[in-house]
Image (tube, rainbow, N blue to C red):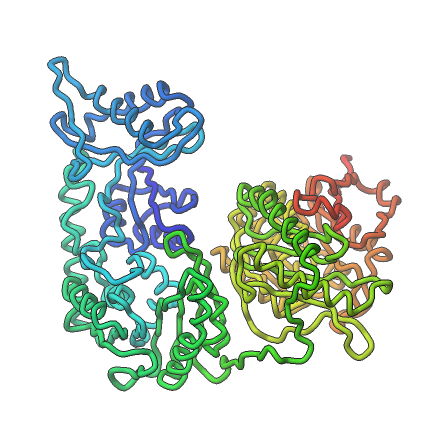
Amino acid sequence: MLMFFVTCPKGLEYLLADELKGFGFEPVRNAPAGVWVQGTLEAGYRACLWSRLANRVILHLAEVNATSGDLLYDGVSAIPWRNHLALEGRFKVAFVGQNDAIRNTQYGAQRVKDAVVDSLRTLDGARPSIDTVAPDLIVSARLHRGILQVGIDLSGDSLHRRGYRTEQGAAPLKENLAAALLIRAGWPELSIKGGNFIDPMCGSGTLVIEAALMAMDQAPGLLREQFGFNRWLGHDPDIWANLLQEATARAVAGKAANRLSFTGFDQDRAVVTTGERNIERAGLKEFATLQCRSIQKFSPAEPASETGLVLTNPPYGERLSERKALGPLYQSLGEAMKQALPGWRLGVFTGAPEVGHAIGLRSYKQYKLFNGKLPAQLLLFNIDKVSETVARERTDTGELFPKISHPERAAMLRNRLRKNRKQIGQWARKQGIECYRLYDADMPEYALAIDIYGSRVHVQEYAPPKSIDARIARERLAEALAVIPEALDIEPAQMVCKQRQRQAGTQQYEKHGDTSEFFTVLEYGCQLKVNLRDYLDTGLFLDHRPVRHWIQQHADEKRFLNLFCYTGVATVHAAVGGAASSLSLDMSNTYVNWARENLALNHLPASRHVVRQADCLEWLAAKADPADHFDLIFMDPPTFSNSAKMEGVLDIQRDHTLLIKQAMARLTQDGLLIFSNNFRRFKLDSALDSSFDIKEVTASTIDKDFQRNARIHRCWHIRHKIQ
């Protein structure tokens, strides 16, 4: 078996891994912007020809010690280059990365080039030459810390360059990103069901063309004239010829069987003309059409089918002034779709997701991606009456308007937020996490918890003490709401504030309605679904992050039990960490469904990772089935609960002894129970020490962003005593 590293745009790694399995590869591991796989040379060729998502297919040759330039040179020289490059051949080095010894890519590429040339040089001075324009071979050299990964780039040019787009409109969508959007929007399934495709703001037609190629089983690499393996000495032309023959036959059959329509609209005649030429070069002239028409004048070119996909990448502007003008455009898009295409699905890929509400539909799914280096989201909607929404007016009762009353005080908050973002934000990025606590009542004047969730900000107001006048508290909150977007360089729409207001003589968190504004964040390689608006909590307890990471690092091959599982995030970490199986229990239907969606988001099989609605108190009290024994248990009960779905009332201080004993009855002899809770006055029953080995690990579970509030939770590791 050969080893390959297949690269892709950031955020497409999981999709690419699934695609590569279909080509005969065995996945090894995902990496940032790529996937490591094992397979045959035929599988590598098939990826070059058929991958809709990859950028490059790199045949891995060796890992080389690169802690110094000389060691790098020696390691690369030891590779048998005569198997890959002719003496009279031409090659180039594609070098990425740096470390303390290799401080720039030019130096790194030079050392690799010298090693290749010197290993092939003959006594009479004959040697291969460098050609950066049309090389026979591209040597891929990827440096990470002290290791250089060396390989052969089988793709040549990036695979997103299909060959049909030799000219393009403004801000074009790359072909493999367009294909990813189509897959995320469910186009393969919709096309099989007979759905048509429309892009109402199509630009130069990339989405239209990719939709047609996908639906008609056209290999995206079939139009390319050259690949990186064509003049490689290890090339097997017979395997490649067979793959080309198969792809050509499938293309002919796909076109003959097609009954779908693929249509694009755009108000710019110049880009429509460019798109028409792209369609012709793609060989789709008789199947796909583009028309010059604005969204305000949208209507399907023919009677719409009952189902189909509208997918578009509307303008979203990088400047704040540009974004403010997007509301009417997105509103027009929503109105046109609701009027013309009820029953269809709508996908909007945008770098301004905060404007998505103007569409007037409730998004049922959001995917976080990148358009180049620009963060963006794919918002998915069902075009139906059930999904229609009405935007809330700013005049709604109780709304608090941002306003700075004391500039000097506001400046202090602004400086603190920027300082924290620099320190904690840099730490979070190195940790591989997108969600963290930025500010936790650092200044007594602003009693807030401010949390970062990717590109969004979640603000919670702590209940002010009775000694603080309610008017003063609202003034300070309004001031903070004015400062936060400016200090963090976000738009106000990217900030959600849950504030306490007087209602019917009591104080409670304001209800934020059913917006269904879910989106995905990353934590140590896990994709997690959160919602900042609809619930008191977001779906992710940030303070338990170190506990979840510990579970991920120690769950390999273990049977995992998650009691009071909430949205199942700890289970996701356990499963991603290699847990053999898991059972997650919670009495809330909402959280059970949320947990299942989190597991599915990470491609974790429901057959091995079961989520069940259950009263944990009843389940623990029941007689344990021999199959219900676990190697690792996580139990983080609420402090108090009198849910109508429960038989009794849970009081964690009163009931924890029984809960722990019941959980330990489900634990294997050498297993571990992680017990945690957030009750600040909690005292663990000392009598438990006589039955179990107990170690408090709270200090190790408080991350950098919660060190100001170290009493946020307490945590113990509990094991059976050694007999």
Residue 314 picture location, percent across and down: 36, 68
Which of the pair 410/18 is nearer the observer?
410
Q: Is residue 541 left or right of residue 7?
A: right
Residue at (18, 69) in percent of width and height: 273
Can the viewer see residue 187? yes
Q: Quadrant of the N terminus?
A: top left
Q: Is residue 653 above or below residue 3?
A: below
Which of the pair 581/576 is nearer the observer?
576
Q: Is residue 581 above or below residue 170?
A: above
Residue at (72, 66) in percent of width and height: 475
Quarter of the image holding residue 257?
bottom left
Which of the pair 610/79 is nearer the observer?
79
Residue 360 picture location, percent across and down: 48, 79
Quarter of the image holding residue 262?
bottom left
Quarter of the image holding residue 247?
bottom left
Residue at (68, 42) in percent of width and height: 671
Residue 122 picture location, percent across and down: 15, 16
Which of the pair 241/355 is nearer the observer?
355
Q: Is residue 714 left or right of residue 27?
A: right
Residue at (29, 38) in percent of width and height: 59
